[in-house]
Amino acid sequence: MSDDTAEREVAHGDATHRTATVRTRHADAPLVAAALAPDETDSMTTRVDGDAIECVVERPTTGGLRSTVDDHVVNLRVADRIVERARTHLAADDGARRSDINGDTDTNT
């Protein structure tokens, strides 16, 4: 996972909001983004662009922005690790099945 983060202030009506953009690259970006979806708040907008996930966070305070971005990055790391471990597990399982020529996976014979 690689990431780029940018922060800026944006004026909206009478209030100034802080905005950060976090862009990360993943082996399976759509799957990682889907894993993140349940934890997203109304202050977040996430999109997938090829192997990249881009999340824009907008909060009224710097502390709130920092907290939300921190939570997002932690969730990204967890989701990315789970996807990678699942791929490794499935690849190992697939290799074991392929090594059994007659298709019988019962080792009690």
Image (cartoon, grey):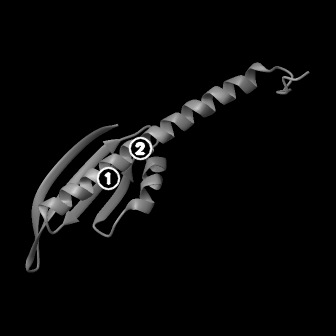
* Relative to 88, residue 6 above or below: below
Q: Position of residue 109 (x, y in %)?
A: 91, 21
**What is the C-alpha distance between the residues marked 1 and 2?**
10 Å
What SS does tag 2 mark? helix
Q: Sort mark 2 into few (<14), some (14-19) or many (20+) by Cα contacts within 10 Å.
A: some
Q: Position of residue 67 (x, y in %)?
A: 23, 57
Q: Position of residue 60 (x, y in %)?
A: 15, 69
Q: Which label belongs to residue 98?
A: none
In the rendered structure, the answer to whether residue 105 lies left or right of residue 65 reads right
Specify which label sits upstream in the sequence, 1 or 2: 1
Q: Residue furthest bottom?
A: 14
* Relative to 85, residue 9 above or below: below
In the rendered structure, the answer to whether residue 72 lies left or right of residue 28 reads left
Residue 51 appears in the picture as rendered: no
Q: Which label belongs to residue 72?
A: 1
Residue 40 placement: quadrant: bottom left
Q: Amino acid at mark 2?
A: Val
Residue marked by disc 2: 78
Q: Residue at x 32, y 70 (%)?
A: 42
What SS does tag 1 mark? helix
The N terminus appears in which quarter of the rendering? top left
Residue 9 appears in the picture as rendered: yes
Q: Position of residue 26 (x, y in %)?
A: 40, 40
Q: Residue at x 10, y 76 (%)?
A: 15
Residue 43 placement: quadrant: bottom left
